[in-house]
Amino acid sequence: MLRRNERVPKTPSERIRSYFWTRYHRVAGDVVHMIQQHLDEVGVVGPTSRRALQFGTFGNGSVMCFPAIRAVNPQSIHVGSGTLIGREVVLSAGWGPGHEGLASRVLSIGDRCVIGRDSTIVAHRSIEIGDDVWTGHQVFITDGNHTFDDLTAPIHTQLIEERPVKIGDHSWIGHGAVILPGVSIGHHSVVGAGSVVTRDIPDFSVAVGVPARVVHRMLESTPVDEAIRPGVPEG
């Protein structure tokens, strides 16, 4: 008679099935990971890729990781040199595919930038991202939005005028931050994770919160490790 929690001994056939299942699972897992690694390597989009040639410009040394980005109207999107665009990033120019009369330069990303995975940048009129700008994952940047003033019309049909967005050189945009229309972020500035930027941020500033506000300012001579420390709230 079996005691509680005591397992029934496996039959020979069960032991054989268990052995082969374990072996199969191990080998199949190795194959899947090898395929994934192979796709990651060959799926990278570089400057000479056919997909990169669809862009307005795509600089030397820049790459888009696999799975490759979804780009809307790439002919109006410009990517500098040495820039890394992470997995599943969405880059969009204009109001939709085949936007007629779209300017030749609507979205610009500078040199040596990093756009974190799952981020979305939607430019209708003008978004300029400077050199050496890094973002965390899931950042959202747009220069257009909806209004809700007309109570008789659906909100999605009420569009406001696009207002350009500019992010200065050497800045860092934290994970999950949102940059809204008409915002200018200064040179060498930091936007904290999860912040929503609704107004301009000066050069050499740290801004956090919803809506984001400047909590620290740094001089150009301040070391970087000191520059990112929280400071006294702006008074």
Image: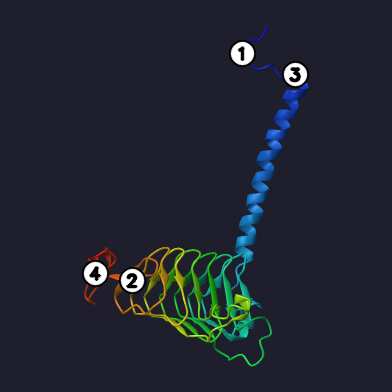
Q: Amino acid at mark 1?
A: Arg
The reply to whether callout 1 and callout 3 are in contact (CB within 8 Å) is: no
Would residue 37 be found to the left or right of residue 183 on screen?
A: right
The CA distance from mark 4 to mark 1 is: 65 Å
**In the rendered image, which residue does mark 4 sit on?**
223
Q: Nearer the viewer, residue 154 or 61?
A: 154
Q: Secondary structure at mark 4?
A: loop
**In the rendered image, which residue does mark 2 sit on?**
213
Q: Amino acid at mark 4?
A: Pro
Q: Identify the residue shown where x is 68% and y is 39%.
A: 25
**In the rendered image, which residue does mark 3 sit on?**
11
The CA distance from mark 3 to mark 2 is: 68 Å
Which of label 2 and label 1 is nearer to you?
Answer: 2
Q: Give the image location of residue 203, x and y in percent.
A: 31, 79
Q: Nearer the viewer, residue 184 or 60?
A: 184
Q: Identify the residue shown where x is 65% and y is 81%.
A: 96
